[in-house]
Amino acid sequence: MVLLLGNQMSSLLSFGLPKGSLEEATLKLFARAGFNITKGSRSYTPSWDDPDLDGRFVRAQEMSRYVEDGFFDCGLTGRDWVKENESNVQVVADLIYSRASNRISKWVLAVPENSPIQTVKDLEGKTIATELVEVTRNFLIENGVSADVEFSWGATEVKVPELVDAIVDLTETGSSLRANNLRIVDVLMETNTVLIANKESWTNEAKRAKIENISMMLNAALQAETKVGLKLNLERSKLSEVLLNLPALRNPTISSLADEEWIAVETVIEKKVSREIIPALKRLGAEGIVEYPLNKIVA
């Protein structure tokens, strides 16, 4: 089966995967969603275990342009790069994950701790370094500020104050900014990974169905990442007390056991609260407590 790119018809769904910082996290997410993707260390063309999928790796910064132009039917990139490239694409789903965490990231305006710059208005006539050039320029225009914005090839945080007066940089936790003695002046935008589709491909019934299926499975894998399954046996008479004292056990599934005075309780809880709930359940008389990992949760 031959993949035809651009506006030519193809029976395959061409999928753009992000090369670089998101690459490893994306491959792990697809694996949890049930898709096995393999690649060589120097290869830009992955192998899929789904015969209806093909594609390649490109930088997230370029992805939305390739999707808009029809080189890919769909792809993963950042909401920030869709905005930066002013790409006319269909945003199918928000997928909150990154190389380091499952947090929303922010593009922030930052300056040295001892800088006299306190607001965006103080940037008049100054120089700013960033990868997100067009968004930064539009931000300045919106605030009535005239300043020079230059493209940064990386390590943006080390360029102030010797080379530039301020930077616009991406941060998840702010730790890198603090480590470089920088403080945040303003937030330009929040961003996260998004699944995007070519507008023409989105109108193709078969391709749209495939894209929606992939979106559902990726979301299901992300939903399961922060949760665990929990099951236990409990005296029926203690159920009300347990639910009253442990509100995290919402809407559990209750099943009768051979001994009618006992029941089996099964539910899904946040992974981070299990360390508190399991000891509390034991103290309330629960037995046979089992915590188990989840692969996917489809709401």
Image (cartoon, rainbow, N blue to C red):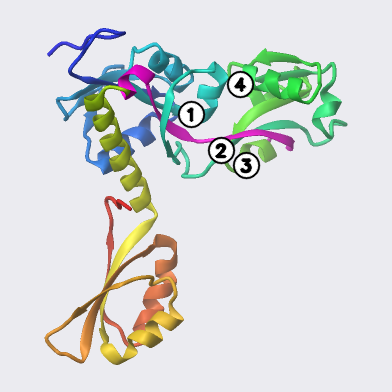
Task: Using the image as rendered, state which of residue 28 and residue 79 is in the foreground.
Answer: 79
| Residue shown at 22% from the left, 83% from the top | 263
Disc 2 vs disc 3: which is toward the camera? 2
Query: Magenta stretch mostly in which secondary structure?
Result: strand
Q: Which residue is mark 4?
A: 132
* Residue at the (64%, 22%) spot, across then down: 135
Please tell me which of labels 2 and 3 falls first in the chain: 2
CA gap between label 4 and label 1 equals 12 Å
Per the rendering, the mark at residue 175 is 3
**Circle 4 sits in a helix, a strand or a loop, which is it?**
loop
Residue 293, located in which quarter of the rendered image? bottom left
Identify the amino acid type marked 3: Ser
Cβ–Cβ below 8 Å for labels 4 and 3? no
Q: Which mark is residue 105?
A: 2
Residue contact between numbered discs 2 and 3, judged by CB atoms under 8 Å: no
The amino acid sitting under disc 2 is: Ser
N-term mark: 1 or 3: 1
